[in-house]
Image (spheres, grey):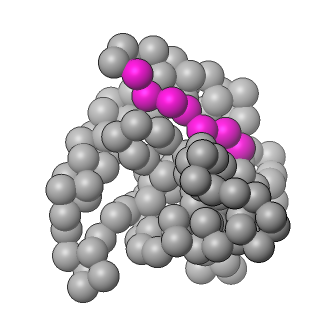
Amino acid sequence: MARILGIDYGERRIGLAVSDPTHVIAQPHTTIIRRDSEAWWDQLAAIIAEQEVEAIVVGYPLTLKGLASRQTEAVERFITRLQERESLPIYRYDERLTSVAARRALQQQGIKTGHRKEAVDRTAAALMLQDYLDSQQ
């Protein structure tokens, strides 16, 4: 059974999470560090293939008032390019406050988040994906 990939897209890092094959539990997977080159697209494609991804959920960053921001526009550009590269369903999902919740969850586990931004990004992706999976039940 295939998995669902959760993506927390950022200008410097892309946090990834995957569901279990039954689409019940999300877990942090990895963080892709974006560099000047486009090589990170190959990393993302390899993960999609290796995890047998059947759908992608991209965190959609809205303001607390529910409005679009500059980051929302960046995510839209990312989604457009992702659709050109992958023939999978791609869903936008409200990610408001997931980074805050991810930091809090990691701190409760005794993990310092100041220098562990990669952990925050993939945990935020997992929290967003879990929320999406729960909404589909």
Residue at figure coordinates x 61%, y 33% from the top left: 48
Q: Does 88 sit above or below residue 97? A: above
Residue at the spot x=19%, y=68% of the render?
68
Taking the view exactly as shown, the residue that stands out farthest to the bottom is: 65
Residue 86 image offset from top left, x and y in percent: 45, 32
Q: Position of residue 41 (x, y in %)?
A: 45, 23
- In this figure, what is the number of numbered marks? 0
Foreground residue among 92 and 71: 71
Res. 6 in view: no
Above/below status of 41 relative to 128: above
> Up-down: is 46 above or below 135?
above
Q: In this image, 74 relative to 22: left or right?
A: left
- The residue depicted at 63 percent of the width and 47 percent of the height is 116
Q: Quadrant of residue 108?
A: bottom right
- List x then y, in percent, for residue 29: 71, 44
Residue drawn at x 30%, y 49% as measured from the top left:
75
Q: Quarter holding the C terminus?
A: bottom right
Residue 123 percent coordinates (x, y): 65, 57
Q: Is residue 15 visible?
A: yes
Look at the picture and state if 38 lies above or below 70: above
Q: Is residue 31 covered in magenta?
A: yes
Front residue (pair 3, 112): 112
The stretch of residues the image draws in magenta is 29-35
Q: Is residue 9 left or right of residue 62?
A: right
Residue 112 in which image quadrant: bottom right
Task: Kindly report the secondary structure that dominates the magenta region of the rendered protein.
Answer: strand
Name the residue nearer the viewer: 117 or 97. 117
Is residue 7 covered in magenta? no
